[in-house]
Image (tube, helix red, strand yellow):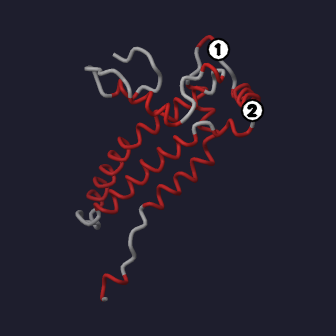
Amino acid sequence: MGEDSSRRLPRWWFGGVCAAIAVTATNPLDLIKVQLQTQTQTDKKSVGEIIRTIYQRSGLLGFYNGISASWFRQLTYTTTRFALYEAGKEYVDTKNVSAKMALATFAGLVGGVVGVPGDVVTVRLQNDIKLPEDKRPTSTFLTAFFASTKRKACPVSFAAHSQPFPGQSC
């Protein structure tokens, strides 16, 4: 048995699960933030008016609009970050702070790229709740995901494909 049997295996997936639990608690605040950020100049509402509108349209469950996409984002982004960091510790000197910082930066960068689709879908779902039900272009995680991935080719930049709302991106 020796040394390997007593070594505790990393539980990097706990990071993704804990992030999903945390986003469950913070989703109502994130929903209100997205509503505030996506207002037009002509239709400005206060935080109280936004809360009242969400509650009147959908009740308490309305504050969890987009939660499936938030869970998807956290499970992909955070789990990727933790897994890459744990795996990378085998290849860097863990006593060297700059090496650990470089590893954490790399893991965070890759995790961020992996998490972008979930983030875009979350914002789409949270913004679409402002519209009447029959006018919402996206009503589920899957329809929002496929709508956000079917962007036209844009020679200008990759960032143009990451825009959460339809319209001219180039």
Amino acid bearing label 1: Asp
| Number of other residues with Cα within 10 Å of mark 2, as a class: few under 14, some 14 to 19, many 20 or more | some
Quadrant for residue 36, please give it.
Answer: top right
Residue topped by disc 2: 55
* Between 164 and 32, the one nearer to me in the picture: 164
Residue 32, percent across and down?
63, 32
**Quadrant in which residue 128 is drawn:** top right
Left or right of residue 4, residue 34 in this image: right
- Residue located at (41% from left, 62% from top): 12
Q: Residue 105, percent across and down?
A: 32, 49
Q: Do the residues labelled 1 and 2 touch (CB within 8 Å)?
A: no
Between discs 1 and 2, the one toward the N terminus? 1
**86 with respect to 120 (left or right):** left
Residue identifier under label 1: 43
Q: Which of 140 and 10 is in front in this view?
A: 140
Numbered disc 2: secondary structure = helix
Q: Which amino acid does label 2 sit on?
A: Tyr
Compared with 64, 105 (above or below) is below
Q: Nearer the viewer, mark 1 or mark 2?
A: 2
Quadrant where the image shows the N terminus: bottom left
Residue at 33% of width from left, 16% of height from top?
170
Above or below, comparing residue 1 to residue 11 in the picture = below
Mark identifier at residue 153:
none
Residue 64, image x, y percentages: 64, 40
Q: Residue at x 57, y 27 (%)?
A: 127
- Label 1: state its secondary structure: helix
Residue 161, quarter of picture? top left
Residue at image location 38% in from the left, 53% down from the top: 81
Coordinates of residue 19 in the picture (x, y in percent): 52, 52
